[in-house]
Image (cartoon, helix red, strand yellow):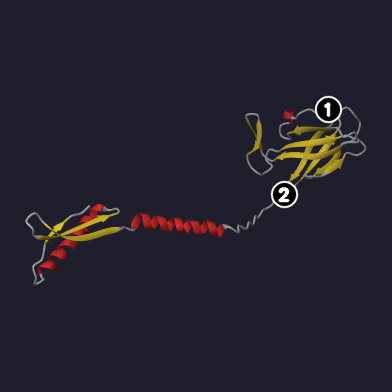
């Protein structure tokens, strides 16, 4: 946790200045003034972007501090002060002026651990999706059939046909090889064989 050492003065009075340390979430009483001060916002390296205040880094190179003052009656007011640009300090109705003495930054590292009981369902769905894509892209369904009939002259003919689900060009080459092999096998038979007629769809 970081801290800010701040010097507080009340202009126009003989009250001696107070030096105190502000930490996030802590309220500090300002002596017997009845006021309590709290750190509101701290911008370590501020830069103006339009009308928005943002930081360029996490190092206190050009800090901007907003403090909140609460009086005994519960009334609160806040004020910004810019140590390196005092002309930009915003006035408030408390009559209190602040001066930054020192800044000690506190750095923390956070580790988040999460458990997802349903993650196996997600991975299972991914595997099923990958398997489906593999089937759709690389698996080809082919139908091949043969029918024995007669031509116009009454001769027996064997009609051979086939149809692929995709990749028609490569299927035609395979179909021609199959038909040629079948034709050669039929020619080797001792009995008369029907003429082979080839069809592809």
In this rendering, position of residue 137 left or right of residue 98 = left
- Please tell me the numbered disc located at residue 93: 1
Q: Position of residue 59 (x, y in %)?
A: 67, 44
Residue under label 2? 106
Above or below for 124 versus 77: below
Give the farthest residue toward the bottom.
190
Residue at the (33%, 58%) spot, across then down:
139
User: SS at mark 2?
Assistant: loop
Closest to the camera, between mark 2 and mark 1, is: 1
Above or below for 122 versus 13: below
Q: Earlier in the sequence, mark 2 or mark 1?
A: 1
Q: Position of residue 91 (x, y in %)?
A: 78, 27
In this rendering, position of residue 137 left or right of residue 11 = left
Give the farthest residue toward the front.
154
Above or below for 37 versus 169: above
The alpha-carbon separation of the residues under discs 2 and 1 comes to 31 Å
Image quadrant in which you'd find residue 183: bottom left
Residue at the (49%, 56%) spot, across then down:
125
Q: Pick whichever, 66 or 116, lies toward us.
A: 116
Q: Residues within 10 Å of mark 2 (few under 14, many from 20)?
A: few
Residue at the (73%, 28%) spot, across then down:
87
User: SS at mark 1?
Assistant: loop
Q: Position of residue 149 (x, y in %)?
A: 15, 59
In this rendering, position of residue 15 left or right of residue 2 = right
Image quadrant in which you'd find residue 28: top right
């Amino acid at each position: 946790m970081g801290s800010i050492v701040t010097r507080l003065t009340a202009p126009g009075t003989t009250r001696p200045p107070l030096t105190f340390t502000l930490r996030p979430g802590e309220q500090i009483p300002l002596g017997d003034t009845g006021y309590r001060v709290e750190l509101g916002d701290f911008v370590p390296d501020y830069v103006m972007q339009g009308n928005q205040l943002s930081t360029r880094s996490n190092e206190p190179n050009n800090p901007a501090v907003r403090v909140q003052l609460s009086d005994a009656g519960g009334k609160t007011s806040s004020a910004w002060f810019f140590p390196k640009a005092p002309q930009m300090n915003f006035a408030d109705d408390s009559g209190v002026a602040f001066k930054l003495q020192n800044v000690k930054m506190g750095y923390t590292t956070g580790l988040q651990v999460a458990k997802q009981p349903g993650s196996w369902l997600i991975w299972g769905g991914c595997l099923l999706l990958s398997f489906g894509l593999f089937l759709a892209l690389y698996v080809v369904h082919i139908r091949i059939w043969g029918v024995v009939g007669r031509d116009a002259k009454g001769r027996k003919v064997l009609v051979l046909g086939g149809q692929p689900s995709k990749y028609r060009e490569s299927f035609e080459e395979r179909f021609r090889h199959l038909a040629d092999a079948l034709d050669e096998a039929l020619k080797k038979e001792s009995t008369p064989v029907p003429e082979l007629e080839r069809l592809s769809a």
